[in-house]
Amino acid sequence: MTAVEMSALVVVACAAFDHDFPQVAERLAAMLAPHVADAHVHIGPDSEFPDGESYAELPHAVIGKKIVICQSLSSAVGGSVNHSLMSLLTTIRGYREYGAAQITVFVPYLAYSRQDRQMPGQRRPTTAQLVAEMLAVAGVDRMIAINSGASGRLGDLYSPVPLSFLETDTFFFQTLLDETEGDAVIVAPDRGARAQARRIAARLHLSIAYADKHRIDAETVRVRLSDSDALRGHRRAIIVDDLVCSAGSVEKVIEALRFAGVSSARIVAPHLRLTATGAARLTELSAAGALERVDGLDSAPTGVALEGVHRHPFLDFLGPALVTELVTALRAVMLA
């Protein structure tokens, strides 16, 4: 398919996205330019009235154009994730009502993704599915996000809107190159992390150990190492996870590792969505000498800056994969 057949494209940065990731929309448009006839950028079409209600106002006509809307669902802009979600919904509806041919949404971190199932003993709704249904009603044709675990289950919940995930293996491999064939052991903190942990351990030629996690409430977990023998002879651990938020899981994993004889740990996770509790826990672990460093992408900015916590630009690691997904989405609509 030629660039002319792909026609015009508009990359939209909602206000929260532009705040959290300055110039990323422009960089993304430049990366997409070879694949389209023409690429433009709209910055911050969403805003709010004095009473706090969200609205969107398009800066230019978009009839017949393909739209890529980028939004951050972790931003403090507007005071909450809910505000950013509502801004995204109004922006989608604005472009749909004014004649966009196709709308693809990219969110680095997919909010509400942890509320993807009913839990025994709790009466909480499957909010991830509710978000998917709202996005579909607003007018989205396709969603793209950075993988945050449970991708298969989320894909099913997002059946009203096709959902694609950017895999994060490249980030792990490049971040951990200095650990190749070292003395560390890869640790999967729960069952959901095991498949990726096995790939990382195989690529880096490292041993692997597993932990089992039981969540008691939103910030409390119980952890047990399922195979302590795998830790013998290892003084360091690399915990690979998809998301660190309250840090309750990694805190308990590190406690179990130290009890088993591992003296220090390093954490690598694509999403660092640290709460105040999470920041305090990581600070305490670091001060105690139990935590060497934390590496993650900048996919979920929270405004919390900690010594030893390193956030890497997601576009540097996942830019080519994101462009591939976007071009695939655009071509799929053309062929439909």
Image (cartoon, rainbow, N blue to C red):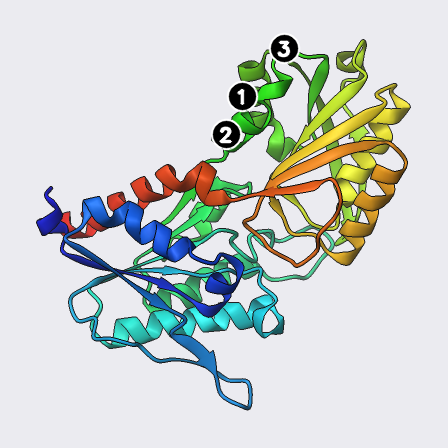
| Secondary element at tag 1 | helix
> Mark 3 to mark 2: distance in Å?
18 Å
Which residue position is annotated with label 1? 199
Q: Secondary structure at mark 2?
A: helix
Residue at left offset 52%, top offset 32%? 171
Whether the residues at callouts 2 and 1 have beta carbons within 8 Å, the answer is yes
| Whole-percent x, y for residue 153 in the image | 50, 44
- Residue 169's tag is 2
User: Which amino acid, by three-letter code, is at mark 3?
Assistant: Glu
> Which is in the foreground here, disc 3 or disc 1?
3
Q: Earlier in the sequence, mark 2 or mark 1?
A: 2
- Relative horizontal placement of residue 110, taking residue 207 as reference (left or right): left
Q: Is residue 68 above or below residue 183?
A: below
Rounded to the nearest angstrom, the CA distance separating label 3 from label 1 is 14 Å
Q: Position of residue 168 (x, y in %)?
A: 50, 35
Residue at 76% over, 18% down:
227
Q: What is the x, y in percent for residue 204?
A: 58, 15
Question: Label 2 is placed on what type of residue?
Answer: Asp
Residue plotted at (76% across, 38% down): 250
Q: Nearer the viewer, residue 58 or 329?
A: 58
Say which residue label 3 marks.
Answer: 181
Could you tell me which residue is drawn at 58 percent across and 53 percent down? Answer: 300
